[in-house]
């Protein structure tokens, strides 16, 4: 037997009982019946909402690699329309093999369309070079890429 209550009734009961839970509202407009979250559900919600924050330029490469491999295992796709951002990207990519003996051999760049596909193994190289460029556009592009991976640099 299911008991259906409105969202306002659900919130009122929660306040009176001394506990508050965000109601899950299905399409029929009623709360989920008041089942408390399990420990596994709470852990999952904490992991999903957890964002990582680091001082600018200090995000460990291991964290970046883990996030990139988890979020974009087949490559990080970008469509760059801004000329300044494209210049920052080109400056980072066109260095060739650098002092770290790293370069871009598996990523794809199309300057005509602005499409990019950064190979997961080369993302740390791109982000490091964007940091080393030292200009505002490079820093903004680095921050934007990290933000989409759930990493905040402040």
Image (spheres, rainbow, N blue to C red):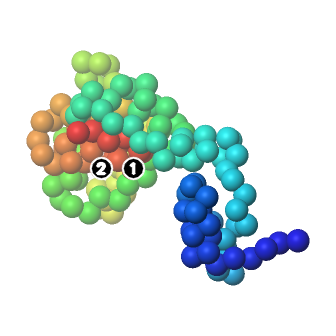
Which quadrant holds residue 121? top left
- Could you tell whether 92 is left or right of 125 in the image? left
Where does label 2 land, which residue? 144
Whole-percent x and y of residue 49? 48, 47
Which of the two residues, 80 or 94, is positioned nearer the viewer here? 80
The residue that appears at 39% across and 37% down in the rendered structure is 52
Q: Are marks 2 and 1 in contact (CB under 8 Å)?
A: yes
Whole-percent x and y of residue 33? 73, 66
Q: Secondary structure at mark 1?
A: helix
- Could you tell whether 143 is left or right of 66 in the image? left
Which of the two residues, 47 or 11, is positioned nearer the viewer here? 11
Q: Secondary structure at mark 2?
A: helix
Residue 95 appearing in the image = no
Q: Which mark is residue 148?
A: 1
Whole-percent x and y of residue 112? 29, 61
Q: Residue furthest right?
A: 1
Kindly report the distance in space between the C-alpha atoms of the residues bearing marks 2 and 1: 6 Å
Q: The N terminus appears in which quarter of the rendering?
A: bottom right
Q: Residue furthest front?
A: 16
Q: Judge whether 71 appears above or below 5 on screen.
A: above
Whole-percent x and y of residue 58? 27, 27
The residue that appears at 61% across and 44% down in the rendered structure is 42
The residue that appears at 74% across and 76% down in the rendered structure is 4
Q: Judge whether 129 appears above or below 80 on screen.
A: above
- Could you tell whether 141 is left or right of 49 in the image? left
Residue 148 appearing in the image = yes
């Amino acid at each position: 037997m299911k008991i259906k209550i409105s969202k306002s009734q659900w919130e009122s009961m929660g306040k009176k009982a001394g506990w508050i839970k965000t109601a899950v509202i299905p399409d029929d407009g009623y709360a989920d019946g008041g089942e408390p979250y399990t420990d596994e559900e709470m852990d999952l919600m904490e992991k999903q909402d957890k964002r990582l924050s680091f001082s600018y330029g200090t995000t460990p490469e291991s964290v970046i690699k883990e996030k990139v491999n988890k979020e974009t295992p087949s490559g990080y796709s970008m469509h760059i329309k801004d000329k300044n951002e494209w210049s920052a990207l080109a400056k980072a990519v066109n260095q060739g093999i650098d002092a770290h003996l790293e370069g871009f051999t598996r990523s794809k760049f199309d300057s005509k369309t602005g499409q990019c596909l950064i190979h997961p193994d080369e993302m740390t190289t791109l982000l490091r070079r964007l940091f080393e460029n030292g200009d505002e556009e490079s820093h903004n592009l680095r921050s934007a890429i990290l933000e989409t991976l759930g990493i905040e640099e402040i």
